[in-house]
Image: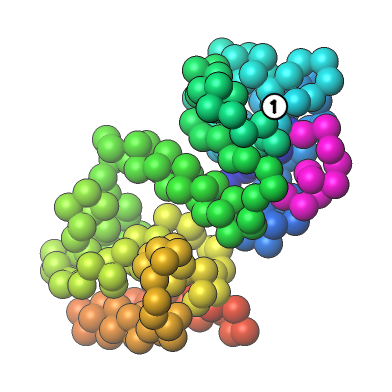
């Protein structure tokens, strides 16, 4: 199931800009143009909230406090206010991050992803295994097993496997996988993702020939299909 992002900003053009960027990544996006409207959407249980500071009526700080009474999901402030005092006030109100407008799409999407990844990691602290039939991934121990057999993976191979497994049925381009596994500052080529996927498939297929958890989405990239 796709993660849900709630966008809250009274500037409709900015909401549209952020919504399009997130929907391109496969997220479900809810939009609100006031604090009051945002509160009516909280029962939809968003996985992360992005909210502006300067809004008519209930401002972002007040809204953040109200959200914290009902939800523990990550909250990312986006604002043209750039002073240290504004950032500190946002964090003290219960926010997890603060991004100054104008911002780049890559940084915006990466921050959303980072908060969701951290949330998944926290949720998985008590349930360390992801199981898909005979395949089991130990996220904390960084081990892959098929039945009783451990499959040795390199660090990068395991990172790719875990990233796709945490987003079942969601297709990712090679470039997206490379950026999220290697990082924004990596200097390599996204073509290396293809080679790593081939090696992962070969190692799993060597134990159970019919098992292929990573599917190819032609013209796009790869997705978890186990």
Residue drawn 42% across the image and 55% down it: 166
Quarter occupied by residue 46: top right
Q: Position of residue 143 (x, y in %)?
A: 19, 60
Image-based side of 138 in relation to 63, left or right: left
Residue drawn 23% across the image and 54% down it: 138
Image-based side of 81 in relation to 68, left or right: right
Q: Which residues are magenta?
A: 9-18
Q: Quick check: 154 above or below 79? A: below
**Residue 182 visible within the image:** yes
Residue drawn 68% across the image and 43% down it: 101
Secondary structure under the numbered disc 1 in the rendered image: loop
Q: Residue furthest front?
A: 83
Residue drawn 27% across the image and 58% down it: 137
Q: Quick check: 24 above or below 28? A: below
Image-based side of 2 in relation to 53, left or right: left
Q: Is residue 116 magenta?
A: no
Image-based side of 77 in relation to 21, left or right: left
> 140 or 185, which is in the foreground?
185
Quarter occupied by residue 181: bottom left
**Residue 70 visible within the image:** no
Packing grade of label 1 (10 A; few <14, some 14-19, many >=20) is: many
> 25 or 167, which is in the foreground?
25
Dominant secondary structure of the magenta stretch? helix
Q: Position of residue 198 (x, y in %)?
A: 34, 85
Q: Is residue 14 magenta?
A: yes
Q: Quick check: 46 above or below 88? A: below
Quarter occupied by residue 197: bottom left
- Name the residue carrying label 1: 53
Q: Quick check: 203 above or below 213? A: below
């Amino acid at each position: 199931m796709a993660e849900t992002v709630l966008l809250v900003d009274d500037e409709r053009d900015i909401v549209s800009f952020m919504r399009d960027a997130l929907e391109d990544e496969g997220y479900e996006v809810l939009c609100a143009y006031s604090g009051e409207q945002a509160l009516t959407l909280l029962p939809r249980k968003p996985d992360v909230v992005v909210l502006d500071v300067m809004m008519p009526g209930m401002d972002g700080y007040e809204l953040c406090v109200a959200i914290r009474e009902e939800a523990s999901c990550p909250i990312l402030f986006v604002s043209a206010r750039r002073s240290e005092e504004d950032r500190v006030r946002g964090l003290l109100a219960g926010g997890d991050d603060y991004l100054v407008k104008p911002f780049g799409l890559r940084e915006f999407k990466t921050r959303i992803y980072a908060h969701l990844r951290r949330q998944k990691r926290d949720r998985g602290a008590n349930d360390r295994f992801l199981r898909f039939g005979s395949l089991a991934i130990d996220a904390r121990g960084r081990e892959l097993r098929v039945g009783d057999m451990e499959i040795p993976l390199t660090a990068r191979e395991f990172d790719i496997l875990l990233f796709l497994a945490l987003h079942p049925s969601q297709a990712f381009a090679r470039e997206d996988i490379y950026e999220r596994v290697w990082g924004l500052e990596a200097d390599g080529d996204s073509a290396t993702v293809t080679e790593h996927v081939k090696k992962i498939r070969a190692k799993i297929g060597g134990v159970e020939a019919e098992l292929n958890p990573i599917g190819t989405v032609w013209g796009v990239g790869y997705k978890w299909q186990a």
